[in-house]
Amino acid sequence: MKNLLALVFLFVSISISAQTDSTSVYKKRVLESTEVDFLMSYYNQDGDNASVTGGIGSEKLWDITPTIVVAYPLNDDDVLTANVGISAYSSASSSNLNPWDSPNTGNGSPWVASSGASEGDVWVGGTFGYSHNSDNRDFIWSGHISFSTEFDYTSTGIGGSITKLFNEKNTELHLGAQAYIDFWNPAYPYELRTYENTGGNLNSGFFRNRTIYNQNGIAIDKSGNGGPIWNPENYTSISNKGRNSFSTTLNFSQILSKRAQFSLSLDLVYQQGWLSNPMQRVYFADKDNYYIGNPESIPIYTSPENKDVFQLADDIERLPDTRFKTPIGLRFNYYINEILTVRSYYRYYFDDWGVTSHTASIEVPIKIGSKFTIYPSYRYYTQTAADYFAPFEEHLSTDEFYTSDYDLSEFNANQYGFGVSYTDIFTKAHIWRFGIKNVDLRYHQYDRSTGLTSWIISGGIKFVMQ
């Protein structure tokens, strides 16, 4: 009997050990091996409503953004990710922070880019994350930190999420939260900063050797003895240089059938602090206009024909110090056959600044052979204006808040896109120890009813370490 019990115990022990080893060996890893994505995009835009120059002027801008994303599996369940990129840009609008700081523009104009220090800048940022999956892959939690900086702004972020899968992984519930603690290093329109630094003395500093003209093109007595002078009495530099953003995300996803899947999402975003942009000028309808440059061009100031006169600002953009945003989204994807899939999306957005918007988009991936897919797409967007928006010279100096940033105006927009993707799950092509898993290239054209047009071309290559 003792021998029999010993044999039974030995059999059970071997069985349990085998099950444990089997689980260890055959448990599917969340990420089989290190993956590296090299991404690159080039963006170009133009328009006639530059916010730095008060709602008129050139919006020419280009931006190039190289990015690298690395996903590294620590073990079967845990993955580290790093997303690091830079964004180098040149902007006609922001260059006119000081429109006179250039031998090429002379007297300055909202329609001509300055070649001064604010002509371009480089943004640098990174996000580093960690995620853990339960053994049965039904529960995932993750966290991340981020940091970014550019010449006038620094941002630090932290966030996390949990994801739970139910119903044999056909149902997914996701909850996420994040916070960003940001700080301005304010850059102001040059004439306003100089006015403050000289205590309003128009015969010193930058203004000493500059003639100031009124709306009729007549030079004014800058001492004020001959009549009114330029006096931006609303202007003060900002004291609260912080901006904090807090958000939560709730997402519900459900597989309806072998062919259909949908998801619902709700975001709650709260911002507080200095939510205006100190670079952006505002001009008042009830204030006299004053200029530096060629007085003969004053009658055509708002026309692109103006190349050599610039209007002195009345103030910078001022907006409430809190904002609450609520986007609600719905996705529906339908697999028609092995060649064709339809991906649709709708989002409704509203906030307490008076902006409401609707977004609708559709993408139709079409599989061409075993490795190539093309991606035609279309997106429509429309929004109402913020309560505090008005075009160039339509605000009053008695208003509490004001902006002429056309991103907060009423408009609608169309975006057309096309992409092509190459995928090889067996990664037969190699560069050193990395197999090429995916190559993606896309182009999008964007047209806004305000006249802004832009296009972006983006691409990426995914490598798998072998």
Image (cartoon, rainbow, N blue to C red):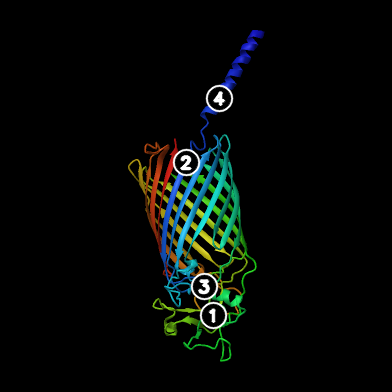
User: Of the residues shown, which amino acid type is indicated by label 4?
Assistant: Asp
Q: Which residue is mark 2?
A: 35
Q: Looking at the image, is mark 4 or mark 1 nearer the viewer? A: 1
User: Residue shown at 49%/73% (left/top)?
Assistant: 53
Please name whichever residue, 115 or 351, is drawn nearer the observer in this view of the structure: 115
Q: Given contact means CB atoms under 8 Å apart, are the residues at marks 4 and 1 in contact?
A: no
Nearer to us: label 2 or label 1: 1
> Can you say whether 430 is above or below 160 in the image?
above
Badge 4 or badge 1: first in the primary sequence? 4
Label 4 and label 3: CA atoms lie apart by 66 Å
In the structure shown, which secondary structural element does the residue marked by tag 4 occupy? helix
What is the secondary structure assignment of the residue under circle 3? loop
Can you see residue 439? yes
- In this rendering, the label closer to the viewer, 3 or 1: 1
The C terminus lies in which quarter of the figure? top left
Q: Residues within 10 Å of mark 3 (few under 14, many from 20)?
A: many
Residue 23 in the image, given as x and y percentages of width and height: 55, 28
Comes first in the chain, label 2 or label 1 = 2
Of the numbered discs 4 and 3, the one sitting upstream in the chain is 4
Kindly give the residue lying farthest to the left in the view shown.
Answer: 369
Marks 2, 4: nearer the viewer: 2
Which residue has dot 1 on it? 207
Disc 1, SS: helix
Q: Nearer the viewer, residue 360 or 82?
A: 82
Label 3 – label 1 distance at C-alpha: 26 Å
- Tell me if 242 is positioned left or right of 454 in this view: right
Q: Name the residue tied to disc 3.
A: 404
In whole angstroms, how far apart are the C-alphas of marks 2 and 4?
Answer: 27 Å
Are the residues at dot 3 and dot 1 in contact (C-beta closer than 8 Å)? Answer: no
Structural crowding at the residue carrying mark 2, measured as other residues with C-alpha within 10 Å and reported as few (<14), some (14–19) or many (≥20): many
User: In the rendered image, which residue does mark 4 sit on?
Assistant: 21
Badge 1: how crowded within 10 Å, few (<14), some, or many (20+)?
Answer: some
